[in-house]
Image (cartoon, coloured by chain):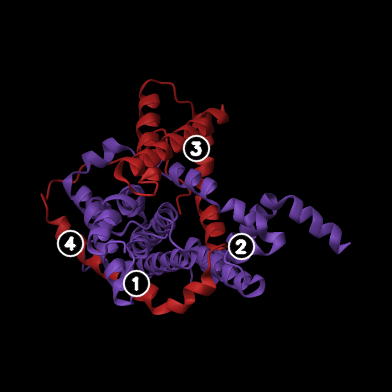
Amino acid sequence: MIIYGVALLALCCLAGLIIGEGLGLLLGVKANVGGVGFAMLLLIFLTGWLYRNGRFKPLSSGGIAFWSGMYLPIVVAMAAQQNVVGALKGGPLAIIAGVSGVALSFALVPVIARIGRAKTREIKPAPHAVLEDRK
Amino acid sequence: MIDLFRDVLIKNGLLTGFAVVGGLTWFSYLISDRLTRGRVHGSAIAVLAGLVLAYIGGVFAEGKNGIADVPIFAGIGLMGGAMLRDFAIVATAFGASFEDLKKSGLPVVVSLFAGVIGSFLCGAITAVAFGYTDAISIATLGAGTVTYIVGPVTGAALGASSDVIALSIAAGLIKAILVMIATPMVAKQIGLDNPRSAMIFGGAMGTNSGVAAGLAATDPKLVPYGVMAATFYTGLGCLLAPSVLYLATRLVFPPI
């Protein structure tokens, strides 16, 4: 049932956000601390565990895959309601931050590739979640 | 007659939002295909189009919520609001398997941490250079340089102002576009020709759309490896930026 996947996703999301709120309280930060990240980890572990136990049916996975595919449109909608007019006043900041971030990350690749140059192992995505439309 | 249309569109705001964003996405992929021959990924153009829409909305409605301040587009506010945003972003983690990440070895984990922390530092230092002194704005701009997802997630979690959040999205967007364009150019120099380095690349870059499009233009076979590592990047960024990295920022720039 598609709703099982959607419900699982919603539960992971809520649980993650609750953990994030709780952690924020614990740390004394008036913020949700890493809730989305915890929710992601929960989803990865739970779907993996259900799949290994043969409880995860393709239709349930469809309920998650749909929302995964909606990620870009939702990000577009999110972008469309930002205060861009206000942001443009600081134009060069965004460009310098972005360019320096990319330059540093490019430079990191060959450096890190030298760490423990093991033979390449065959790596496949989780079988229950084919990576599609992840653009 | 026009009122009738308006009423229906306003009453069913979320549906209007789906339709508008769908049309915008279609148009963006068309531009990507025709004008850039696929080099600039449709997804990056779509996000850019969203920001342009927000700008137009900001000019006409003179509000802080971009196009969502225009009544018939208010549904876009619900569609891109915090609830559905977190929901869809969590869903993208589906497809990444923790075992696979572990199997790919230490370098990918190192690249994920180095990529997130390095990009955060670049954004944070730039923010400081531009005169920001409050930890929330600095951390949000640092997070935006991580990816255009981590920026708003961090900004929303910390309570950053909307213009800082928009700026953080812009930084992440510039990063994504640059990764798409520059990856095929630097692929040889950084040894981007096998699954292992593709995963390290995905881990260090992190922007899903940037990595997918950049690798597709380099060697389509490398795409899944890079994207798989990149899926963890946003999660790691969402985990680290509003927590450890924000707290570290606050140590350097304590609240007054």
- Which residue has dot 3 on it? A64
Which label lies toward us, 1 or 2?
A: 1
Q: Residues within 10 Å of mark 4 (few under 14, many from 20)?
A: some
Q: Quadrant of residue A23?
A: top left
Task: Estimate the spatial distance between the alpha carbons at disc 1 and disc 3, rounded to whole Å.
Answer: 39 Å
Q: Residue at x 54, y 53 (%)?
A: A74
Ranked by sequence position, the earlier of labels 3 and 4 is 3
| Alpha carbon distance from label 3 to label 4 | 35 Å
Q: Nearer the viewer, residue B10 or B210?
A: B10
Residue corresponding to mark 2: B24
Q: Look at the numbered discs 1 and 2 and tell me whether their residues touch, using CB distance below 8 Å.
A: no
Direction from residue B255 to residue B213 in the image, left or right: right
Tell me the distance, in whole angstroms, between the alpha carbons under discs 2 and 4: 38 Å
In the picture of the structure, the residue carrying the numbered disc 4 is A110
Of the image marks 1 and 2, the number of the one nearer the N terminus: 2
Mark 3, secondary structure of its residue: helix
Label at residue B132 = 1
Q: Closer to the camera, B162 or A127? A: B162
Comparing marks 1 and 4, which lies closer to the viewer? 1
Amino acid, disc 2: Leu
**Chain purple in the figure, letter:** B
Q: Estimate the x, y position of residue A14 in percent, counting from the top left.
A: 46, 36
| Amino acid tagged 4 | Pro
Marks 2 and 4: same chain? no
Residue sitting at x 31%, y 64%: B256
How far separated are the C-alphas under marks 1 and 4?
A: 33 Å
Q: Is residue A79 above or below residue A53?
A: below
Left of A68 or right of it: where is A95?
left
SS of the residue under disc 1? loop
Q: Which chain is red?
A: A
Whether label 2 touches label 3, CB < 8 Å: no
